[in-house]
Structure formats: structure tokens, C-alpha cells
Amino acid sequence: DGGFLLAGTSNGGNSRDKNSAIGQNDFWVVKLRDTSKPEKPKTTIEALPNPVEDFTNIIVNFDYTEGTASLFDINGRLIQEEKITGSHTIPLRLGNLPMGVYIVNIKTNTNEESIKVIKK
């Protein structure tokens, strides 16, 4: 991504308690991004796991107070719909559905996003 990754260690910290190893040896990893490149937009919703066998969790990465989570098949038919109220994790069971591609639509008072979920 054009940034830098720095790694290093510190050895022999300044601990007063000689029986404790806390602070004696540390390993550091620091990532610096290239500020001249535009930052990629963050994903507003995710499905984990995806592909899914039985259930998935829809992760909502924005704040809201109320809305609906709707599941559609690939032909646009509504399979299920439920009200949601501010939760950032929405469990979704797909175990009773046939294999295929489904669309989850999250519509709230602040945003509307959709994600493709693959049922295997």
C-alpha cells in the first residue's frame, strides 16, 4: 500500500523487581501508511463467516437506533425480515435454506447497505 512497516525489539528493561520479566524484553511492530495516497473507505457492513453453512453474523460498522435486516434470494424475493435496534452484530440463520447466493439488506435511520452471502 506504499506505507512502511517497522519492527524491532527492546532488551533489558528497567524493572526494579528482579523476579519479574515484565518490561524486560518487548517486540514492537509499527505500521506507517503513505499519507499521499487516499485511504480506502471502510466497509460499512460485513458477514462473518461468509460463505456460511448454518449461520452468519452481520457486522454493522455504523451507529443507528432502529431499522430492518432483510434477507433476499438471488431473484429478489424476500425470505425473512426482522427489526433491529442499534446492535452492531446481527445473527442470521441460513441453515434451513438451500445452497445459493443471498442478499442481506440493512436499512436503518442513518444508512442503507447490502451484502452478498453465499450459503454452501
Image (spheres, rainbow, N blue to C red):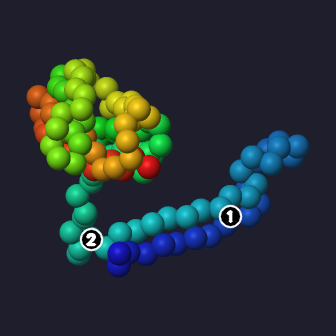
Indicate left or right for 25 with 33 as reference. Answer: right
Q: Quadrant of the N terminus?
A: bottom left
Q: Residues within 10 Å of mark 1 (few under 14, many from 20)?
A: few
Nearer to the camera, 25 or 101: 101
Mark closest to the chain's N terminus, 1 or 2: 1
Secondary structure beneath dot 1 equals strand
Q: Residue at x 41, y 32 (%)?
A: 96
Which label is found at residue 35? 2
Q: What residue lies at 37% left-to-right and 37% top-to-bottom?
A: 97
Q: Is residue 31 above or below residue 72?
A: below
Q: Against 65, is 1 above or below?
A: below
Residue type (three-letter) at the residue carrying disc 1: Ser
Q: Nearer the viewer, residue 17 or 106?
A: 106
The residue that disc 1 covers is: 10
The image shows a total of numbered marks equal to: 2
> Furthest residue to the right?
19
Q: CA distance from mark 1 to mark 2?
A: 28 Å
Residue depicted at x 20% and y 45%: 114
Left of 9 or right of it: where is 73?
Answer: left
How far across and down, in percent of the image, does residue 60 sit? Answer: 29, 38
Taking the spot 23% from the left edge, 58% from the top edge, the residue there is 41
In what element is the residue under mark 2?
loop
